[in-house]
Amino acid sequence: MVDSSPNLAPSLWERVKSGFSYLIRLRDKPLGFAGLVIILFWIAISILAPYITPYGPTDFSTDKFVGPSLQHPFGTDRWGRDVFTRVVAGSRTAFSLALSATFLGLVGGTTLGLSAAYFGGWIEEVLGRLMDILMSFPALLIAMFVLGVLGPGTINVIIVIGIAHTPRIGRVARSATLQVKNQEFVEAARVRGESDLYIMGAEILPNILDTLGVEAAIRFAYSIFLSASLGFLGLGVQPPTPDWGLMISESRSYLQVAPWLAIFPALAIASMVLGANFLAEGLEEVTGGGQ
Amino acid sequence: MSEKRKVSRRDFIKGVAITGAAVSLPGLASFSSRANDRKVVKVGIRSPGNLTPGLMQTSPAQVITGAYGDYLFRLRGSESERTPSLIENFSSNQDKSEWTFKLREGVKFHHGTELTSTDLKFTVERLMDPDFGSPAKLLFDNVDKIVEEDKYTARFHLKSSDPDFSLNFFNYNTPVVAHDFDYEKYGNTKPSGTGAYKIEDYQQGEKLVMVKNPDYFLPDVPYIDELQFIIVPEDSTKKLVLQAGDVDILTNISFTTFTQLKEQAGIRGEYALGGFQAPISMRTDRPPFDDNRVRLAVKYAGDRRFMLESVLSGFGDLGHDHPIAPSYNWYTDLGTREQSIEKAKSLLAEAGHGGGLDVKLHYPTNIFPCADTALNFQQAVRPAGINLKLEGTKSGVYFSKYWLEANMTVTQWGHRENVLGFLNQAYKTGAKWNEGHYSNKELDKRIEQAASEIKPEVRQKHFTEIQRILREEGPAVIPFHQGIFGAVADEIKDYTEVRNGTHELRFVKKT
């Protein structure tokens, strides 16, 4: 006998397909398309980083403070390190930090926001207030406070940025869930006797992925910016790891004699943040405001 | 019906500008005439922290104290000429267990009372008081009692012979203070001293203004009317304020700032070499550095010449893994340990670390030259299979969490006029700041013998042996001894950096 219970939820595969279709539809959105191109460019750079230049990102040389030239397109720093190599290698640091932190924030925020909206009642109240409290502090302040306790380092930076993202993603996940949770396919799942966990993970989550995707792109841009800020403050990754924020921080004493030390990493940060923001804007448009 | 005239935005701005000019021009004119009459020198410094004599902890506090306060002795520049300052003369008995200091007569504190032996006795007893908590306390642990022989003479009776006792008064926390002044109340805001300048106004975090002390004991000194200390927290900002002419002198600048400023027109760099050092310390009480072969491997892996050139462009002395810099009289040339990657590798293999060594190296990021030392050392030892993971933190976190705790650290140590200061504080068994938790009975014995021995040639033998032990078995790599750096505008004459960090501002002139 055929199961006649209603199930109107699109499958996960259909969702993935629609995700790709959104990217293809970005062709018609110049800003979003530019963002996609910039991000793809940086992805390519970070994958190919070790093969792009002949120098090591942490190798000292006797060519100190050499200005941009054919041999060193972005010049060299006070230890004779090739700035181009460090900017290129820095894209790996930036990507790994930003992607991991965004993913962590997505997991935490989605779990909290989805649970709050799904269960409602006192759970929603408690989680909602918790997120309000976290959001009342600027993300950078939370990050500085937590890093002050945990100490600087790559893993800790990922954790604190992830924590800083959690309430913001949580709020978006909550409002998206509220719009979905009373729809027919959710009711149908309840009628079938599915568990809460199943309903949240298999019925609701796939239907709020559009919204979360747009939010993830915005958070990714913030992650780049926040990790660069923490690097600048000396709370991020440690030297000699090439990190754009750290590179700008180290260049401060030499701005008059070697401005290239700050200009190129700053351009890299700006382009990646802009790219992610453009992409988020484009995605928002093609997904219809994330809904 | 009268017609109300509308006031346009342009009229309003014009009115405000005219009123503002009318109010401020007379003030500006009088300010300008005062500025022309008075010779004012401005010094850019970091925030000094606690200014209370005896409780100071920073170089900027030391600079300020050198201007409003005085010591029994002074140093002149890097040539280490020790000259009596508040004393006319001093002497000791034959076995160096009694020291007598005769103070200058007629020296006055800024609050009006005359300097006497009571003040000298009060100064040292205050430092010795455990409740007071001075970092200089241990310098005077050997003092048994202080006797006022007469109004201007004080005799120090020591528990045991100390041929270097007078050197303790070169410590920056030993300015002579007045017994009848409330330092608890005013020590951190407007302390009284006998110095060439008197503190007039202190706006914490902004500036400290001193004026000429007309009663100073050296005739005609100082040569300027006003000395201002402008608080400039960032090194990079310091450079800009000197270039803009907002300050005339910069003290305690980083080497980076020094190298950039000394090349610029209208500015000259000043520096002095002394006992400054940034030891890379290894914990000898736990693996892997409890094995001297591992410590020696690290010492062989480091390239001192490369580091001196890379970090300081040669503005310093080569270090030899013991704290006695070449500028000290007790220094013995035991040769420079040249880098040997092969030797380092074989020592590591012998010690069971043939596959390499991974260690975290902690350092304060905001104290020069710790970060540069760590980074260059990491680079130098890498070929030997020693992988240092750099863990830099701000000094507050570093000193509360990692210093004296972590397996490997880099810390900046200031100059001590008495080299025994380093040995007693950092290398003797159980010493308070023994970063490597090092313990060596032979070394302890030699330090005690060097401290009490009267005959210079026998003392030299002890000091040589101390240097040999620390060089071969000690807990630290000391790749170089850095100087103390400053920069001044060309109009400033007769300013000198002093090797112990008490910058000489008394004789400054402005042309």
Image (cartoon, rainbow, N blue to C red):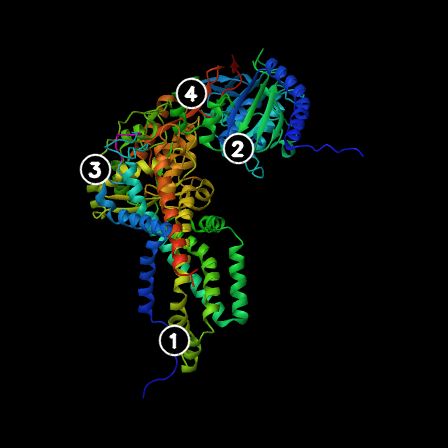
Dot 2 corresponds to which residue?
B47
Q: Nearer the viewer, mark 2 or mark 3?
A: 2
Q: Amino acid at mark 3?
A: Ile
Give the numbered dot on residue B120: none
B133 shown above or below A148: above
Q: Nearer the viewer, residue A131 or B124?
A: A131
Q: Nearer the viewer, mark 3 or mark 1?
A: 1
Dot 3 corresponds to which residue?
B341
For disc 3, the neighbor class at 10 Å (few under 14, some 14 to 19, many from 20) is many
Which secondary structure lies at badge 1? loop
For disc 1, the neighbor class at 10 Å (few under 14, some 14 to 19, many from 20) is few
Residue at the extreme bottom of the image, as rendered: A1
Dot 1 corresponds to which residue?
A8
Does residue B368 appear to the left or right of B379 in the view shown? right
Q: Quick check: can you spot residue B215?
A: no
The answer to whether marks 4 and 3 mark residues whose Cβ atoms lie closer than 8 Å is no
**What is the x, y in percent for residue B504?**
50, 20
Q: Amino acid at mark 1?
A: Leu
Q: What's the magenta bit mostly, secondary-structure-wise? A: loop
**CA–CA distance in space, label 2 to label 3:** 43 Å
Dot 4 corresponds to which residue?
B270
- The residue depicted at 42 percent of the width and 50 percent of the height is A222
Q: Earlier in the sequence, mark 4 or mark 3?
A: 4
**CA–CA distance in space, label 2 to label 1:** 68 Å
Does residue B144 appear to the left or right of B479 in the view shown? right
Q: Earlier in the sequence, mark 4 or mark 2?
A: 2
Q: Nearer the viewer, residue A163 or B465?
A: A163
